[in-house]
Image (cartoon, rainbow, N blue to C red):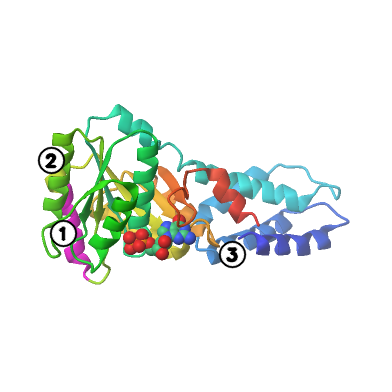
Amino acid sequence: MFKSFKEGIFKLVHKLKEKSLTEKEIESIIDDFYITLISNDVALNVADEIINEVKLSLIGKSVSRFTNISELFLDSLRSALYNTLKLGQGGDLCDIIKRSDKPFSIVFFGVNGVGKTTTIAKVAWMLKNKGFSVVMACSDTFRAAAIEQLEYHADKLGVKMIRHNYGSDPAAVAFDAISHAKSKKIDVVLIDTAGRQHSNINLMDELRKIVRVINPSYKILVLDALTGNDAYNQAIYFEEGVGVDALIFTKVDADVKGGAIITVIRTIKKPVLYLGIGQKYEDLIPYDPNYILSRLLI
Ligand code: GDP
């Protein structure tokens, strides 16, 4: 993400070698930052706010020709981005589950392909390892192979999965899973939902019905870090449609630009629980602002 920042700064620093930095020159470097933020999927208003913070932090700083100007500017930008990423801290799922009534039911939302089912399997693996008992529910009764996909993970993990037939009521599946958990004293119910994008009104009605019928303990939105601005639009769509308690970003192991993560965290203001960093069960790490920042600062 910062490659072009560094190039931009290098050019200016070169010009500024023998004199002190003027306000106009600060502005021109900041403009470079702004353009790079936008071209890396940071939303315009968020880029504006971040640039303003960088400017404010630089005003009044004394510089001479011996000052490492590129480091000064980059440090200031790093702080502004870190402060934004820090807003995503604050969610410890295991702690929340420990403190809550059981069974603790979690509905996972997210459009097809973001990695929702894989993430549910990762969460089940992690919870089992921490000593929680888990049941899964396949409330995606729409997409061909959705049930078999979740079942594959359930079998591998040794976790029971509640399923109905394709075309049946997703809310009824979730309800049955919670009843099962109550009768067997299972700690956590993980509910997979549909994420079709081509009949959105139906989808949101279906998700709202699940939420109405089971009143879940927690609602997690899964977002693909690689989808740029789409992740932001999805966050707004699900937050407005069903409400979201927390986020998980997947595919952070891939070459993420990071702008969407920054925009979503800054605008949605929800905790980020975990980051998906690969396809294996263990590739789910607690959210860490520094992990994201270090991946952006290449
Ligand atoms: P769903 O349609 O949202 O349920 O998505 P899936 O769970 O089927 O995942 C879609 C693809 O993304 C699969 O190939 C997963 O292996 C892959 N995937 C999921 N999470 C991650 C991740 O954190 N990193 C990488 N590299 N791939 C992931």
Left or right position of 295 against 8: left
| Residue at the extreme right of the image, as rendered | 18
| Residue that carries the numbered disc 2 in the rendered image | 179
Q: Is any part of residue 270 visible from this angle? A: no
Task: Point out residue 280 in the picture as x, y percentages from the top left corner.
Answer: 45, 54
Ligand 1 found in image quarter: bottom left
Amino acid type, residue under disc 3 in the picture: Ile
Left or right position of 200 against 296: left
Label 1: state its secondary structure: helix
Kindly report which numbered mark, 1 or 3, lies closer to the viewer in this rendering.
1
Name the quarter where the C terminus is drawn: bottom right
Label 2 environment density (alpha carbons within 10 Å; few <14, some 14–19, many ≥20)? some
Kindly report which numbered mark, 2 or 1, lies closer to the viewer in this rendering.
2
* In the foreground, 187 or 236: 187
Task: Point out residue 143 in the picture as x, y percentages from the top left corner.
Answer: 23, 67
Label 3: state its secondary structure: helix
Amino acid type, residue under disc 2 in the picture: Ser
| Residue that carries the numbered disc 1 in the rendered image | 205
Label 2: state its secondary structure: helix
Q: Vertically, is 130 above or below 106? A: above
| Residue that carries the numbered disc 3 in the rendered image | 35
Q: Gap between marks 2 and 3, in whole Å? A: 53 Å
Label 3 environment density (alpha carbons within 10 Å; few <14, some 14–19, many ≥20)? some
- First in sequence, mark 2 or 3: give its number: 3
